[in-house]
Image (spheres, rainbow, N blue to C red):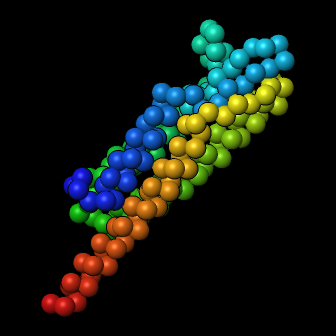
Amino acid sequence: MIQRIQSLYFLLALALMVSIFFLPLAQLLDNAQISYIYSFRGLMIEESEEMLYHSIPTIILLSVIVLISFVSIFLFKKRVLQMRLNSFNIFIMVGYIGLNYYYIQNFQKQLDAIVSYKLPMIFPLLAAILTYLAIRAIGKDEALIRSMDRIR
């Protein structure tokens, strides 16, 4: 049911999170002028695209976030389950942001590099805000349905 506002919020959050699969999150430049790219998969050298460090936890978290966002679009008949799943999804998004920040700071210290954050770094935060707005809209729908049940 795409015509519901919460479905549009979920779709936008899903689009933001899927775009992280294709865009770099940060660029690190060390003292020897070697450029490194940090993406959801880990750290790689920009020129050779050789992976230096694979980040399995971020891959798993991002996959779970995308899966929950996708599934929740189709749970429009189970509003309470939809709200609970997405509350959990917001928690995972905040954890994903923290984990990425931890990895980037760790790589910055190890490489003694300068970090340049890219725009996709804020996508999980925007997706969490959109998911929160969707939860509020679902709550309003649930309250409306319950009030209609009381009248009967």
What residue do we see at 67% from left, 26% from top?
A: 27
Vertical order, 120 against 78 (above or below): above
What residue do we see at 42% from left, 48% from top?
A: 13
Report the quarter where the N terminus lies: bottom left
Give x and y (percent) for residue 129.
Answer: 50, 56
Vertical order, 1 against 102 (above or below): below
Q: Is residue 106 visible?
A: yes
Kindly indicate the quadrant of the structure image that contains residue 82: bottom left
Camera-nearest residue between 145 and 123: 123
Give x and y (percent) for residue 34.
Answer: 75, 14
Q: Is residue 50 visible?
A: no
Tell me if 141 is positioned left or right of 28 in this view. left
Number of numbered discs overlaid on the protein picture: 0
Kindly indicate the quadrant of the structure image that contains residue 106: top right
Tell me if 152 is positioned left or right of 129 in this view. left
What residue do we see at 23% from left, 56% from top?
A: 3
Give x and y (percent) for residue 43.
Answer: 65, 24
Give x and y (percent) for residue 152.
Answer: 15, 90
What residue do we see at 50% from left, 40% from top?
A: 62
Which residue lies most toward the left here? 152
Tell me if 128 is positioned left or right of 37 in this view. left
Which residue lies most toward the top here? 48
Vertical order, 90 against 103 (above or below): below
Which residue lies most toward the bottom here? 151
